[in-house]
């Protein structure tokens, strides 16, 4: 007797017979969604004959459509997606003791990590080179990194090549160009030949912005000034003992210099490039591939924390939290001036700029492209690279957009936008033209 055959008919991933078969290839998310749908059908119609008869007569799509009016199918699918087991629960996360780290710190304070099933150990690291090396050595799973270090590591600039991804930008603005008090009557950069400036890292955005600022005022950044790499925690002491004339660095260094009478704020970095990225949250691509679920759990947590601290209504009490010894170990009154944007500049003025520091998490391609063109401009990068391709590879803009939307936020438009730096427009879609214009001049 011939065994009857069944022709499988897949409707929205389900066979019309109601049984599970090997159908069209689907992605992980779709597979979880199908599993939820099948579990629901089997639970509501446990009798196989009845279930198959029903699905054959009206179709799986119709049944599921009717059920969706009574049950939150999409919500159930989303819950199932989030229940993927974490490959690694205990994560070591490095941060620098500067105001840029607020989202990482608030991930702990708000319980964002615990909500995702993670046990995060925050490790305070003094300097950029050290925190970079800890990531390279595998001591850190996720790490704060000043921009554009993730980009330079990914192309092997300054060491071994290691593919690093930028999950989010920790903060925008939040830096100051500070001078020693003896230079209060010497505010024109044209007169700064022979100055020694502290920077946190040779390939940091601070060093690149300082170079651009000096060049715009007629100095040769390679010949007319000297740079000294100094950890952010040592800016003020270096200024006080006279080993440097000034520094371009992250807060609270600038405000602390004013508070301790060691220097004055010549300008805040927002005056140079409003909205510039300072630090980023980074992870090695190899770590992400080994721990995809833990990676996504951390990603959701840090975006949630960033969105929280970016809301000005949530800034109350932030200075007190950050001031604690295990975090920034700085005077609360200093941090309050940075966070609120109402601050003393050390020249007798009280200034008010609510955007002195911000915490929008979206990683813009345009900023990455400008920073890389500066490395080429000053010959730190010896050859041209595909700047746009590198930005797309390193800056996880698509993923950040998706998570922001899931959390009810509206991410900015992606793509290669234009930036305004020192009043000049930079078109990130044409980096080669920008560099050609510099070489001609």
Image (cartoon, rainbow, N blue to C red):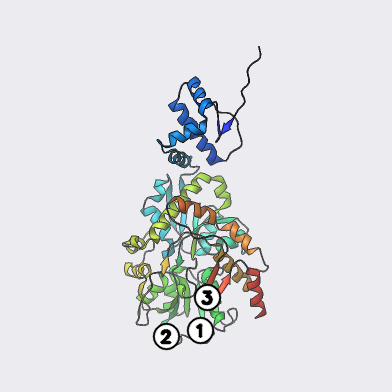
Position of residue 254 relative to residue 362, above or below, is below
Report the label total: 3
Position of residue 424 relative to residue 328, above or below, is below
Q: Nearer the viewer, mark 2 or mark 1?
A: 1
Q: Which image quadrant for residue 349? A: bottom left
Element carrying mark 1: helix
Q: Nearer the viewer, residue 58 or 222?
A: 58
The structure residue drawn at horizontal position 43% and vertical position 51%, both measured from the top left corner, is 407
Are circles 2 and 1 on residues that touch, CB within 8 Å? Answer: no
Query: Which is nearer the N-term, disc 2 or disc 3?
Result: 2
Q: Nearer the viewer, residue 247 or 341?
A: 341
The structure residue drawn at horizontal position 39% and vertical position 63%, both measured from the top left corner, is 328
Position of residue 206 relative to residue 179, above or below, is above
Query: Which is nearer the N-term, disc 3 or disc 1?
Result: 1
User: Dot 1: within a 10 Å radius of its alpha carbon, few (fewer than 14), some, or many (20 or more) residues?
Assistant: some
- The residues tagged by marks 2 and 1 sit, at their Cα atoms, a distance apart of 12 Å
Identity of the residue furthest to the top in this view? 1
Element carrying mark 2: loop
Measured from the top left, where is residue 211 in percent x and y? 55, 76
Position of residue 181 relative to residue 110, above or below, is below
Query: Which is nearer the N-term, disc 2 or disc 1?
Result: 2
- The residues tagged by marks 3 and 1 sit, at their Cα atoms, a distance apart of 11 Å
From the image, tell me which residue sits under label 2.
184
Q: Which image quadrant for residue 391? A: bottom right
The structure residue drawn at horizontal position 47% and vertical position 29%, both measured from the top left corner, is 41
Q: Is residue 161 left or right of residue 40?
A: right
The structure residue drawn at horizontal position 49% and vertical position 66%, both measured from the top left corner, is 278
Q: Is residue 4 left or right of residue 217?
A: right
Measured from the top left, where is residue 17 in percent x and y? 55, 25
Measured from the top left, where is residue 196 in percent x and y? 51, 79
Query: Residue 189, which numbered label?
Result: 1
From the image, tell me which residue sits under label 3.
210
């Amino acid at each position: 007797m011939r065994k009857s055959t069944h022709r499988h008919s897949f409707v929205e991933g389900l066979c019309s017979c109601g049984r599970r078969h090997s159908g069209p290839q689907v992605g992980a998310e779709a597979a979880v969604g199908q599993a939820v749908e099948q579990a629901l059908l089997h639970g509501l119609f446990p009798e196989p004959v009845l279930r198959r008869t029903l699905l054959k007569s009206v179709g799986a799509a119709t049944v599921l459509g009717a059920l969706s009016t009574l049950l939150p199918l999409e919500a159930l699918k989303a819950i199932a997606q989030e229940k993927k087991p974490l490959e690694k629960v205990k994560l070591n996360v490095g941060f620098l003791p500067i105001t840029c780290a607020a989202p990482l710190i608030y991930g702990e304070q708000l319980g964002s990590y615990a909500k995702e099933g993670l046990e995060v150990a925050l490790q305070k690291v003094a300097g950029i080179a050290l925190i970079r090396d800890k990531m390279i050595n595998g001591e850190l799973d996720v790490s704060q990194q000043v921009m554009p270090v993730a980009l330079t590591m990914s192309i092997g600039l300054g060491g071994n090549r290691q593919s690093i991804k930028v999950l989010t930008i920790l903060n925008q603005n939040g830096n100051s160009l500070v001078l020693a008090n003896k230079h209060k009557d010497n505010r024109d950069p044209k007169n700064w030949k022979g100055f020694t400036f502290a920077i946190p890292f040779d390939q940091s955005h601070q060093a690149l912005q300082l170079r651009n600022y000096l060049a715009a005022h007629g100095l040769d950044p390679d010949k007319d000034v000297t740079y000294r790499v100094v950890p952010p925690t040592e800016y003020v002491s270096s200024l006080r003992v006279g080993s440097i004339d000034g520094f371009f660095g992250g807060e609270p260094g600038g405000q602390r210099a004013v508070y301790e009478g060691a220097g004055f704020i010549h300008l805040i970095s927002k005056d140079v490039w409003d909205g510039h990225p300072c630090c980023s949250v980074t992870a090695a691509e190899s770590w992400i591939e080994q721990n995809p679920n833990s990676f996504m759990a951390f990603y959701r947590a840090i975006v949630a924390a960033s969105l929280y601290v970016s809301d000005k209504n949530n800034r109350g009490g932030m200075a007190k939290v950050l001031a604690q010894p295990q975090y920034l170990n700085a005077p609360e009154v200093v941090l309050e001036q940075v966070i609120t944007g109402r601050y003393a500049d050390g020249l007798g003025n009280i200034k008010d700029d609510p955007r002195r520091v911000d915490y929008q998490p979206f990683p813009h391609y345009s900023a990455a492209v400008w920073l890389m063109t500066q490395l080429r401009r000053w010959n730190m990068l010896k050859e041209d690279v595909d700047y746009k391709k590198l930005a797309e590879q390193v800056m996880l803009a698509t993923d950040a957009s998706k998570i922001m939307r899931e959390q009810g936020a509206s991410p900015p438009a992606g793509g290669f936008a234009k930036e305004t730096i020192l009043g000049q427009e930079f078109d990130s879609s044409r980096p080669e033209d920008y560099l050609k214009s510099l070489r001609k001049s």
